[in-house]
Image (cartoon, grey):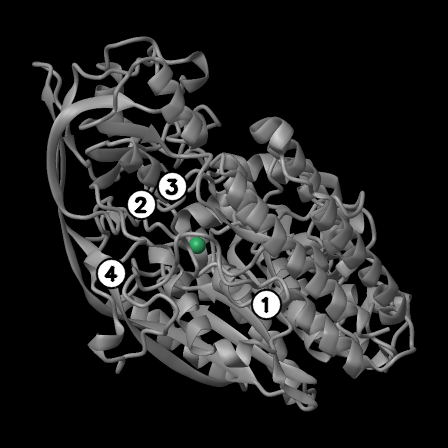
């Protein structure tokens, strides 16, 4: 039954595959019109790929646009914030789908500390004549979903309750440099309500910095410059944010630790005794000043009435007047009542036990909870994952079994602070110490441009997987990815979620001149797997113009009009998602590339060394030892790559050292935030989503702390040598 490359082509365009033809005629037509798709007939890490190639062909034929549409419609039928009865119903739906596919599936509950908004008020109280009573309900002229009484008012999760009346100051994006600029301008934010626009950095970091500078409260608003009419037509005419659209979202300090605030390091299983929890007041990942979001409709009267100096011109957004920074004369009364309590959330876990290496897990995860309907975020991911599971199910029926164990996960309460994934990872830390990879998918589809982020060892693997999946635009996903990688970076930044893209300030894919794969920041469920447990991780998504993030308008109507009308990209993402898991699960030799890892770390070190010279001048510490250790890692990786790609050497021995190499990057934890153990990647304390690379060293430099910089360099050098030493064992 093994087919040649030509056979593969026929299989994908002509065969059973009936599903593809019936349900996505556009796919077939477009493929015929442009570059042909030819699946590669070799797979790195497989010594004899015939059986795997055959299984992949069967798998790729299954994911069905019509069924993905059906999943999405069911998952987005009602608002389903974590812990709600509607969220429970989505858990049961996923359980049913996992079980139908033949997975050993169950619901895993956790009891976690969360809040819901009881009463949220933001009123302008001065100057006289300026009237605004918010937050206004989200409303446009033509949307059938906006009136549901279960839609929560706009709020920020984990803001404390509070009652503040104060003058307002505008602080641009609320970044460290923005607060510094205000200081230079002589504008004091102490005791003020700071209004900042969404974008550039994680919202929790904005609140953290505002609090550090003495602000009494924070208003976060969506400026039309960043994801509204300045980008293009607003919803429902176009995909961008309308005047009343609000971005909800958590302001947990997840750069300290994510998950249940009362259980860092341990799992919030339902019967966990209270004595094992810390009091919420003691939790260091919760903000202490009130914060709430506004639409630009509600923010306009505030912004328009600020006095004081003109804002720096780069702070000007797209509202039709000149922005000033204040303070005052506009004065706001913020009264927030939040109801904090322990809430039960539900992960759904589905397992296919491996035949040969059952203790080595390949975990694939996506969250299921949403702020409102969550059509794009996250249901596009859930629908795609369910079609991937559907494909695995068809393989199981045909008698196929993976060598390693496949774990599929539907996380809950990601939006509140990566809670479902963090509690699961903490509970299964021991099992996961042998996991070979974690594959995340959050937003699977907001448009047609594929993008990915990963640890450097997995970047080439992702490119290879993308070469084996056809694109709705013709050719492979990889071909289209390569052609549009610049575009997708732009779009992702537009959509205020920067987690998928290579950071403009850092060289991505320094290891090769190939299509850039980004670095992993701290914005989604891969965080506990990579940054706490050292499981090699990746994140994938297909992006486009998307201005309804975390609003009531991220619903089925928006998705079918703008996101993916034919569900062809849902099918594509289901195929990528399933393929990356099944290929990793049955590989002879793990396709982890530590030569690439070494090359990227070398780039990070060069940048850090320059920064250290600027910060410390003559006294700057030597990077020679760390650089030498990186070269050693790169060399050990290159030597091993030669064996990995050939049919020589013992795969078991190679896999052992490859699995251990990533764990060698785990240390005792970063200064002030010991939950984060990984010495190469952590969410930045001052940047949030953007990956902070070699965070211990970089943050010590940022804080002008020479002693700490030296100490962190030593820790890094030790970890690099440990990883290199692990790899050298395979020689
Ligand atoms: Zn999400």
Task: Name the residue that disc number 3 marks.
Answer: 205
Question: Would you identify the image quadrant in which residue 155 lies?
Answer: top left
Compared with 105, 81 (above or below) is above
Compared with 104, 549 (above or below) is above
Q: What element carries label 1?
A: loop
Q: Which residue is drawn at 26% across and 75% down?
A: 276
Task: Check whether the beta carbons of the residues at disc 2 and disc 1 lie within 8 A of each other.
Answer: no
Task: Name the residue that disc number 2 marks.
Answer: 248
Q: Nearer the viewer, mark 4 or mark 1?
A: 1
For residue 114, the mark is 4
Do we see residue 579 in this rendering? no
Q: What element carries label 4?
A: strand
User: What crowding class fits label 2: few (fewer than 14 Cα within 10 Å), some (14-19), or many (20 or more)?
Assistant: many
Q: Is mark 3 on a helix, strand or loop?
A: helix
Q: Where is residue 15 in the image (x, y as percent from the top left)?
A: 76, 71
User: What crowding class fits label 4: few (fewer than 14 Cα within 10 Å), some (14-19), or many (20 or more)?
Assistant: many
In-image side of 502 versus 93 (left or right): right
Quick one: label 3 or label 1, which is nearer the N terminus? 3
Quick one: label 4 or label 3, which is nearer the N terminus? 4
């Amino acid at each position: 039954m093994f087919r040649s490359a030509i056979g593969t082509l026929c299989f994908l365009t002509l065969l059973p595959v009936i599903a593809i033809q019936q349900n996505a005629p556009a796919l077939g037509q477009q493929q015929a019109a442009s570059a042909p798709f030819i699946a590669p007939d070799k797979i790195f890490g497989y010594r004899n790929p015939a059986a795997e190639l055959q299984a992949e062909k069967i798998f790729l034929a299954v994911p069905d646009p019509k069924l993905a549409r059906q999943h999405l419609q069911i998952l987005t039928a009602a608002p389903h914030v974590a812990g709600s009865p509607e969220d429970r119903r989505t858990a049961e739906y996923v359980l049913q789908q996992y079980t139908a596919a033949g997975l050993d599936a169950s619901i895993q509950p956790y009891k976690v500390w969360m809040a819901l908004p009881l009463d949220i008020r933001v009123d302008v109280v001065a100057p006289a004549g300026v009237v605004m009573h918010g937050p206004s309900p989200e409303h446009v002229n033509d949307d059938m979903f906006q009136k549901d009484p279960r839609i929560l008012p706009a709020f920020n999760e984990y803001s404390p309750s509070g009652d503040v009346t104060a003058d307002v100051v505008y602080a641009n994006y609320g970044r460290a440099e923005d607060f510094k600029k205000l200081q230079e301008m002589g504008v004091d934010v102490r005791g003020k309500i700071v209004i900042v626009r969404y974008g550039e950095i994680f919202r929790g970091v904005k609140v953290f910095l505002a609090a550090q500078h003495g602000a009494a409260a924070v208003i976060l608003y969506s400026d039309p410059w960043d994801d509204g009419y300045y980008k293009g037509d607003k919803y429902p005419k176009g995909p961008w944010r309308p005047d009343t659209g609000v971005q909800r979202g958590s302001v947990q300090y997840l750069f300290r630790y994510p998950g249940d605030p009362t259980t860092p390091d341990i799992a919030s299983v339902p019967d966990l005794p209270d004595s094992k929890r810390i009091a919420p007041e003691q939790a260091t990942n919760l903000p202490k000043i009130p914060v709430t979001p506004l639409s630009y409709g509600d923010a306009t009267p505030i912004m328009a009435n600020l006095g004081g100096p003109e804002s720096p011109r780069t702070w000007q957004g797209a509202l039709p007047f000149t922005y000033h920074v204040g303070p005052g004369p506009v004065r706001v009364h913020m009264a927030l009542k939040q109801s904090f309590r322990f809430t039960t959330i539900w992960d759904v876990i589905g397992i296919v036990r491996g035949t040969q290496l059952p203790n080595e897990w390949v975990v694939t995860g996506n969250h299921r909870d949403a702020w409102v309907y969550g059509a794009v975020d996250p249901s596009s991911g859930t629908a795609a994952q369910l079609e991937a599971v559907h494909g695995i199910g068809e393989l199981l029926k045909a008698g196929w079994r993976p060598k390693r164990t496949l774990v599929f996960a539907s996380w809950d309460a990601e939006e509140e602070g990566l809670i479902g994934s963090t509690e699961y990872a903490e509970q299964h830390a021991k099992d996961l110490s042998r996991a070979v990879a974690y594959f995340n998918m959050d937003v699977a589809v907001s448009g047609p441009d594929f993008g990915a982020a990963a640890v450097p060892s997995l970047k080439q693997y992702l490119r290879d997987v993308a070469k084996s999946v056809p694109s709705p635009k013709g050719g492979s996903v990889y071909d289209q990815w390569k052609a549009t990688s610049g575009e997708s970076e732009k779009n992702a930044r537009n959509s205020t979620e920067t987690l998928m893209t290579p950071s403009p300030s850092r060289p991505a894919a320094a290891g090769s001149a190939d299509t850039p794969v980004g670095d992993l920041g701290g914005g989604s469920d891969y965080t506990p797997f990579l940054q706490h447990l050292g499981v090699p991780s990746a994140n994938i998504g297909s992006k486009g113009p998307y201005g309804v993030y975390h609003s009531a308008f991220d619903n089925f109507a928006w998705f079918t009009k703008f996101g993916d009308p034919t569900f062809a990209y849902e099918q594509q993402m289901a195929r990528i998602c399933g393929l990356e898991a099944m290929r990793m699960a049955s590989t002879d030799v793990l396709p982890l590339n530590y030569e690439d890892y070494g090359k990227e770390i070398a780039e990070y070190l060069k940048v850090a060394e320059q920064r250290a010279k600027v910060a410390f001048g003559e006294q700057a510490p030597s990077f020679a030892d760390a650089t030498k250790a990186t070269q050693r890692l790169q060399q050990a990786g290159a030597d091993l790559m030669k064996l990995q790609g050939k049919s020589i050497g013992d795969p078991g021995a190679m896999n052992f050292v490859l699995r251990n190499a990533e764990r060698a990057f785990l240390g005792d934890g970063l200064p002030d935030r010991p939950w984060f153990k990984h010495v190469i990647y952590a969410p930045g304390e001052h940047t949030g989503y953007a990956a902070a690379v070699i965070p211990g060293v970089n943050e010590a430099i940022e804080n002008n702390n020479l002693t700490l910089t030296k100490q962190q360099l030593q820790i890094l050098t030790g970890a690099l040598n440990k990883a290199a030493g692990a790899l050298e064992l395979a020689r």
